Image (cartoon, rainbow, N blue to C red):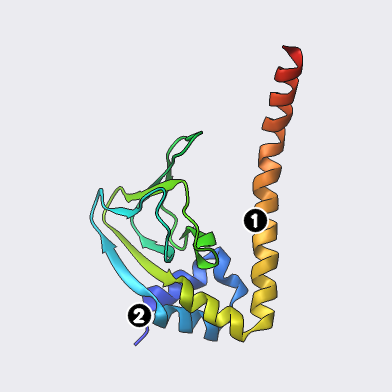
Amino acid sequence: MISDDAADALARAEFFDICDDQQRSLLAFAGDRRLHEPDAVLYQAGDVPEGAHVLISGTLKAKPEGSTPGKPYAISEPGSVVLTMALILAKPRPITVTAVTECLTLFIPRHAFMKLVQQSPELAQKAVARIEHDLGSYLGALEPVGRKMKARDGAQ
């Protein structure tokens, strides 16, 4: 039986708007509802995630780590997808995600998402377009920083 909160979380999750209702239902069925106590680690930087989490309730903290760690930030919007790229890639990520409050998430395993993508060329095309768009947005946000760094390096 598919829980209403799992199906609702996927319907609210921006990334999963590439899926039709039937595909979201299949992912909700394949997903695993997980309750996380405060301070629980959902994902440790450097580990290879097995999929992505969709926040149903609570607040998470994402802390970028690695050679140039960034400032931690909160994730509290129901339907937020944490580690979206883990739905496609089995690569370690330089971020640690912990629960700030008691949190309920829907864990979507990579194998379930990839099975849907392999069965639906249309979904595969939508996934590629969404990822290209999201990466373009990230790169666009970094462009002004890159210009500042070049200007600073040129002044030295």
Residue 97 on image: x %, y %? 38, 50
- Which numbered tag is attached to residue 54? none
**Count of marks placed on residues:** 2
Q: Secondary structure at mark 1?
A: helix
In front: label 1 or label 2? 1
Kind of residue at disc 2: Ser
Residue 11 on image: x %, y %? 51, 73
Residue 74 on image: x %, y %? 41, 45
Disc 2 residue crowd, few under 14, some 14–19, many 20+, Cα 10 Å: few
**Quadrant holding the N terminus:** bottom left
Classify 25 as above or below 99.
below
Residue 52 horizontal side relative to residue 139, left or right: left
Say which quarter of the image contains residue 105.
bottom left
Residue drawn at (37%, 84%), measured in percent from left and top? 2
**Quadrant holding the C terminus:** top right
Residue 86 on image: x %, y %? 50, 62
> Which badge, 1 or 2, comes first in the chain's sequence?
2
Residue drawn at (66%, 64%), measured in percent from left and top? 130
Kind of residue at disc 1: Asp
Disc 1 residue crowd, few under 14, some 14–19, many 20+, Cα 10 Å: few
Say which quarter of the image contains residue 3.
bottom left
Residue 141 horizontal side relative to residue 7, left or right: right
Q: Which residue matches tag 1? A: 134
Say which quarter of the image contains residue 48.
bottom left
CA distance separating discs 1 and 2: 29 Å
Q: Which residue matches tag 2? A: 3
As rendered, which of 8 and 38 lies closer to the eye? 38
